[in-house]
Amino acid sequence: MSPYMQEVIAMTRRWFQRFKREPMSIIFGLTQPVLWLALFGNSGVTFRNAGAIPGASNYIAFMTGGVVVMTVLNSGLAGGIEMLFDKENGFLERLMAAPIKRSALIISRFLFVTALTGVQALMILGMAFLFGVVPATGWLGVGLILVIGMMLGIGFTAISMALAFSMKGHGGFFALLGFITLPLIFMSSALVPLQSMPGWLSVIAQLNPMTYAIDAVRGLILSGWHISLVKVLIVLAVFDAICLTWSNRILLRGMR
Amino acid sequence: MKTQNVSSTAPRAPTSDRSDRSGGVKPIIKATGLVKRFGKTAAVDGLSLEMYEGEVFGLLGPNGAGKTTTMRMLITLLAPDAGEIVVGGFRVRDDAERVRNLIGYIPQERAVDRALTGREHMALFADLYHLPKAEGEERSAWALHMVGLTDRADEVVANYSGGMKKRLEIACGLIHRPKILFLDEPTLGLDVESRTVIWRHIRELKAEGMTMVMSTNYLDEADQLCDRLAIIDQGKLAALGTPRQLKESLQGDVLSLTPENGDSSVRERLTIALKGLDDVVHVVHRDGAIELRVTPSKTILTRVLDVVNGQGVRLEAIQYTRPSLEKVFIHYTGHQIKDEWA
């Protein structure tokens, strides 16, 4: 095993060990999405212009895609928090004093957060299945949903880690998270399809990478395969590349 | 593993003069002209230090004197604005990773992960220092045993006391057999018992020949553990030497004589006689006693007593006081160190 692999594995293992000791965090992380599904999805809301979304006979099937992506957003944006704690309590410095490549730590965090979001997305799809939502594209579609979720998650995790290293303390970090999360959700197609938005909002929503992920996931659940999925994957790849480049600069400067 | 080659064939940075005080011994750490500024204030301001193999070197100074900044530069975590550091033959600036292989670092904060067990910490650091699995487990068991945590190794650190956390940190810092161990305020905020245990570990490691660099603002700790001390004040070197040298440098052992007869004429007579002695720097009267400031010497006490007997004076009390490191500290820095161990 190469020294680099040994570093990455050891630090990824640490994230899982920490997680294992606090299993409630995944439960709480799933509370919000489940509430979205259970309360909103089953509230009997139907679209006046239901024809706008083919196959969206009920709101819960429509919501599933949005809820998956919102969960990815939350987990991704929370992904940097542990790094911030490490930085604050001196553990990061302890790690940095070891002869390790700095990128090994960053990669370990991505591996963990990405695995976590994948599992969460799967659990939401399972929950939706219990409410009667069966993805139109079957298992292959579920696989692609996970890929889309993870790609979006990587970008958000990168943003989160960069913020963690730019902020003075975790107080400011949490305040900022609270400040950006809701607007990101409202300015996407999570709750309302693009077609039903006022024009100005739909313009903004189309700049939000979440919208692409949501519409893709929604399509895979409601209708089936579509050529626009390729575009979505390209958009997400570009989003990841931008976020990673930007965060990498900040992280490596912060870790020397 | 190519990064762990520290033999003599490894590239060595040219370390200049061999004509230092310790008889041509090459320093294992050599820092020259270190400067580090944070904003406009210079935390470290032209500091040069050398540490030798096998010694416990102390960085002593008040809070904010630049001890931690200096240490962070030595352990490659902070780049100096100016100056050069060579550790174990490697320039920190060019060969940080090789330097990191040589050193262990025990930070000031309880930098442990509360959610992990002691053994999980050891496994983590064994991997970060690239030990093979078997060796890592063996070293982990050894280090946990050394700091007396074997019984609690599988408990999460959240259950540990402050002293246990510090001991775990020491174990983590030792897993890869570092040549040099850096300890930043190793007993800060610990209770007296834990402190004694940490001191014992430091002495044991020294006996095994490990080089240690520790910062502290506890004077008794510096006095007890360090072979040599650098007193740092406002980022500059205020004094350097063994604790004994530093104390003697004050030229201020105090010999206090209280004559049985409190008569001032007796005291005057004795004072005049004593002033003529070699090594007596200064004589003052204080509360019925005669206080001599003397240069430390083996014979000073007997010579003074000869004079006293010669004058036919009987003494009620006699007291010889060495200056404490605290006095040394005040002398060189002009202010008192804040001792939280009161």
Image: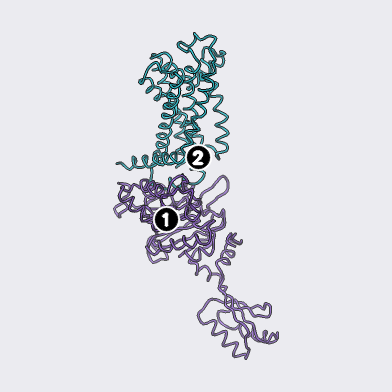
Q: Residues within 10 Å of mark 2 (few under 14, many from 20)?
A: many
Percent of width and height locating residue A162: 49, 34
Nearer-the-camera pick, A246 or A211: A211
Q: Is residue B50 above or below residue A5?
A: below
Q: Is residue B56 visible?
A: yes
Question: At 51% across and 29% down in the image, what residue appears?
Answer: A31
Q: Colour of chain A?
A: cyan
Amino acid at the residue labelled 2: Leu
Question: At 56% across and 26% down in the image, what residue appears?
Answer: A182
Label annotation for residue B129: none
Chain letter of the purple region:
B
Percent of width and height locating residue B125: 39, 48
Q: Is residue B215 above or below residue A123?
A: below
Q: Circle 1 sits on which residue? A: B149
Amino acid at the residue labelled 1: Leu
Quarter occupied by the C terminus of chain B: bottom right
Percent of width and height locating residue A27: 48, 33
Q: Are marks 1 and 2 in contact (CB under 8 Å)?
A: no
Which colour assignment does the render follow? Answer: by chain
Q: Is residue B96 visible?
A: no
Q: Circle 2 sits on which residue? A: A84
Dot 1 falls on which chain?
A: B
Q: Is residue B95 above or below residue B241?
A: above
- Dot 1: what SS? loop
Q: How many marks?
A: 2
Percent of width and height locating residue B85: 43, 52
Measure the alpha-carbon separation of dots 1 and 2: 29 Å
Nearer-the-camera pick, A100 or A133: A133
